[in-house]
Image: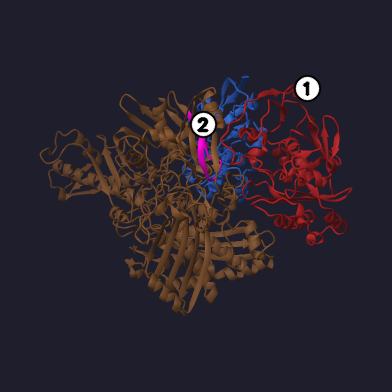
Chain colours: A red, B blue, C brown
Amino acid sequence: MDIPARLPDPRKREKKMYRFEYHKATSLEDAASKRSTADDATYLAGGMTLIPTLKQRLASHSDLIDLAGIDGLAGISVDGAVVTIGAMTCHAEVAASAALRDAIPALADLAGLIADPAVRNRGTIGGSLANSDPAADYPAAVLGLGATIVTDKREIAADDYFLDLFETALEEGEIITAIKFPVPKRAAYEKFPNPASRYAIVGVFVAETEGGVRVAVTGAGPCAFRVSDMEAALAGNFAPDAVAGITVSADDLNQDLHASAAYRASLVTTMAKRAVAKAAG
Amino acid sequence: MAINVSLSVNGQAVSRDVQPNRLLVDFLREELGLTGTHVGCDTSQCGACTIHLDGLPVKSCTMLVVQADGARITTIEGLAPDGDGGDLHPMQEAFRQNHGLQCGFCTPGMVMAGIGIAQRHGLPSNDVIRAELDGNFCRCTGYHNIVKSIAAGAKAMAMTGAKTVAETGGE
Amino acid sequence: MADRESGIGARVLRKEDKRFLVGRGRYMDDINRPRQVYAVFVRSQVAHGTLKGLDSGAALETDGVIAVLTGEDVAADGLGSLPCGWTIHSKDGAEMKTPAHPALAIGKVRYVGEPVAVVIGETLEAARDGAELVELDIDELPPVTDVVAALEQGAPGIHDDVPGNECYHWGLGDEEAVDKAIDAAHHVTRLELRNNRLAPNAMETRAAIGEYDPVDGMYTLHVNSQNPHLHRLVLAAFVELAPEHKLRVISPDVGGGFGSKIFIYSEETVCAWAARRVGRPVKWTATRSEAFLADAHGRDHASTAELALDKEGNFLALRVRTKANMGAYLSTFAAAVPTWLYGTLLAGQYKTPAVHVEVRAVFTNTSPVDAYRGAGRPEAAFLLERIVEKAAREIGMDPAELRRRNLIPKDAFPYQTPVALVYDTGDYEASLDKALDMADYAGFAARRAESEARGMKRGIGLSCYIEACGLAPSQLAGELGAGIGLFESAEIRVNATGGVKVFTGTQSTGQGHETTFAQLVADRLGLDMDEVEIVHGDTDRVQYGLGTYGSRSLSVGGSAIHMATEKIVEKARKIAAHMMETTADDVDFTQGLFTAKGTNKSMHFKEVAFSAYVPHNYPLDELEPGLHESAYYDPENFTYPAGTHICEVEVDPETGVVDILAFTAVDDFGRIINPTIVEGQVHGGVAQGIGQAMLEHCIYDDESGQLVTGSYMDYAMPRADDLPDFTLAFTETPCTHNPLGAKGCGEAGAIGSTPALINAITSAIGHENIAMPATPLAVWRAMRGAE
């Protein structure tokens, strides 16, 4: 499939941000209530995708509801076998967290590969997952670790969360509050960045967890997906060679001018192999 | 509807009514006259607009002013301890000593990013500096002397006791 | 090493840096004028079509919109077409086709992004709102964007007055000799290649503020220009906006140019003109997305080449056929780039006896193409250094050895090439040897074995480039079709107290002119660097000059400054002689001190300057008071920087990723004034050359004619981690015909580096079929033959 441009489409005429109202939510209830009373409101987390999109008039909203003022949405806590990361925790904090680096170094590594340092100081894990860009990095970790998305209404298993291109299991108005990551025995992430945008052309997260081996891929399809053949092979032999001969079908993969579907398919195998080597190493 | 924001910019308290869709970079440039912060792209990639928000580098083209309410902002104009006339910040001085700039347009963003790199890494290797500059574009220097400048600036910051993020908790 | 800290050859820190480092640079968008309004251009969103109508009704009803102006309004005010300043003649003697280039489209649109109307608003937001509401009624026509396709039978015609889309069909060299040599040769190497299209991407986008004073009829145009006087000349003499003395062009600090800010574009023309229409200053600043469409692009050639060799590997002849994409209209210097700046360089550093080149310039439905860092010379060097490398591999000779065998020897200068140029001086083997040594060429085989042991492919590539710069002898340029002279001017005003202002017609866009030129003058007059100020960028302050491009600022502009400085010294010497009661012949001048030979009398330059303005004891019968001189320098020849670049890469066969392990550049720029600044120029040039080779590409969709790489999300800019540290060195054969011995260093990096990198990649992957940019995808595909 051809992925649509995420950010400015050069074919669009020059535009400037449409006007909107801005509200700072004081609590989750306040945010939900503000959203429900507005015409066409959306939540603002770090804004690293939303603001460029608004700037280019690729989207318009009547109201932005800023979640940054809500207490308790940011921070990282490690509780034995589970790491909980608040939805408003920025990528830089995830990358730099000593506690996380002890528990799941692969996740801290992944956060340090998102965008660039200045963007990592603003962009949040919750915002990234709510947006579910097909080439974002976090979806690989969430799916690869079998994390749980905690919202203001419920908990959603990673396997049920990513539905399609920019489409998740989140319901209208639902707010991600935290992500719970089970600590794996070992894990690693390998990213092949787009030379222009530096989003993932392919990113593969490999983890050996209590529940078995998981291999999750981002960048290659409409949303993050698992590769069961690789998982099965690694369950028997957690070594790079186990996945070296396993390829995903190019048929359903993304293609654009930076990477054909066949190239992406090849990269999935290569990145998986390297991630396994890193995790095993 | 205009919203009142109060923030500190280069140590000065600022309070203004702003439109919700006002970008921080436009506010700094157009309302405060701080034109050292530049705009080089419209996709949040080039980093010419990099400033420090509560001590951390961020892209001011990708933030609304209303999001910065209550924040402490430092721009390139606020770095030199005695303002324009006196000594430069060690990172600015390192760029001067190492020919880390040519046309100067990306330079404010590079200096602000460079300070962030020094604060995060202490004495970073060239490879770390190069990796950490992926959000800052320069078309003139080929980055060679920018990398050299940031390495030298980081060293000077360490020697002059400029505080690291760890020491200040991001302040 | 220099004898003074600020002397010629010294690594003086740049004077301009402090203002940039504290955020006090003054770029176009930092400037605002009282009562200014804002322009937003309505651009064509289709590549080719008949413009049937334009509805500005809704736009005009938008709050804050003042005016919507169109091509017909421009025409009604009598403004002319944007000209091409260089006329090329085809092989058959016919003059090139120059279709009209209106500032705002009339009747037809010919590329995506072509300005069709301008909306003027009280605020930028109002103008943008208005622009969104202008309705264009366009009957779409099929577009053609590819340079080869545009020449094919049945291709869509872009201009009614240009049959077959061909602008010209130019030739240079001895065709018969080349044909004979190729037919009889022991070996012929053949190569077909594309030179990819690039967006210049100066980090500061283009911008303009037009102003008009109805009282005195004076226009003032602020524009980030590489040549403010050229802007004034073209807008006065060709576009007929205003007489030259009623137009002031100011170019402030300019955030990079690389060619893109030479040209006279629609937007600044419209801002100046609209200022009179609306009676307010009109400001426009391009967004980056707009810049991708509205800045002139660079390169975009499709070429075939054949190189004939004898049994020993001596080059016998080179035949080149090139199709050059001009885009939809001829930009200011477009016609000269693939001809006199390209074909003339195809001899390279080699003594190839016969070279013949033909170039067909082609109109397409794309943004205009013009000079971009190197302009023609990178295209020549890329083609030549690729075919030489390929020839070496085909005949089984070491590529360095094949080059060495064919280099023009250092005792052969001046050297007449078979393609018009006379190289004044050079020692190409010296650069080659030094580069081979620095890159440890001899040790490559061992390094390759080490890479292979890790499953990686290692390659090394050379490029022995030459370029012609320092544009140019005016008379020769005129014979070749230039519409302007190509000298440079300088004026030096010494103040009574000894400080100096130097006025130059060149324009810094980041090259450090305020430092290098001050070094020249301070060194000669014995002053401190901070006693010399360089002034440029304002046609009302600075005498007519030609600006900065073609690496000309030092070799041409610096030579003019040198001449003016010498005039100052000679006049001061006469004044000093009078005061010391001797003759000028008996006065020496070194390090700021005039001394009367054979006496102990001496006077400092500043004392003499004071006397020139307080002429109490002064030879008023022989000399006018004052110390103020000007000079115009018109070069005798181009200058010929040359050198060897060597690139070593490792290719990951699984992913196609190319890692540049080392990049060595040895360049001969003649005499160097400030090595730090020169190295900076090489760094930046090499980065742009590497960008072309492996990252950057303007790609048009064939069917829709849309630019699909129109933002940094898809157009890959070189970042710090794409590039290695560079290893540089210089050799020096001073230019023989300018007083500084300087050759120019601004473009060499972008010329030499591209083929060196591609030669390294082809060396690594073991075959020649790789197109630029050599992205991971392209390399991966090349290593597999096909998917």
Please tell me how many numbered marks the rendered image carries: 2
Q: Which chain letter matches label 2?
A: B
Left or right: A65 with respect to C663? right
Q: Is residue A137 above or below residue C692?
A: above
Q: Which residue is mark 2?
A: B77
Q: Which chain letter matches label 1?
A: A
Label 1 element class: helix
Q: Is residue C374 visible?
A: no
Query: Which residue corresponds to the image point at 38% horizontal and 28% vertical from the top-left?
Result: C276
Q: How dense is the environment of label 1, judged by Cα within 10 Å: few (below 14), some, or many (20 and up)?
A: few
* Residue closer to the observer: A157 or A278: A157
Label 2 element class: helix
Q: Position of residue C692 (x, y in %)?
A: 53, 54
* Residue closer to the observer: A61 or C746: A61
> What amino acid does circle 2 point to?
Glu
Q: Is residue C26 above or below residue C563?
A: above
Q: Which residues are magenta?
A: C38-54
Left or right: C420 with respect to A279? left
Q: Quadrant of the C terminus of chain C?
A: bottom right
Residue A33 numbered tag = 1
Residue C567 numbered tag = none
Distance CA(mark 1)–CA(mark 2): 41 Å
Left or right: C214 with respect to C776? left
Q: Position of residue C459 (x, y in %)?
A: 59, 65
**In terms of secondary structure, what is the magenta stretch mainly?**
strand
Q: Quadrant of the N terminus of chain C?
A: bottom left
Residue C529 forms part of the magenta stretch:
no
Could you confirm whether marks 1 and 2 are on the same chain?
A: no
> What amino acid does circle 1 point to?
Ser
Q: Nearer the viewer, mark 1 or mark 2?
A: 1
Q: How dense is the environment of label 2, judged by Cα within 10 Å: few (below 14), some, or many (20 and up)?
A: many
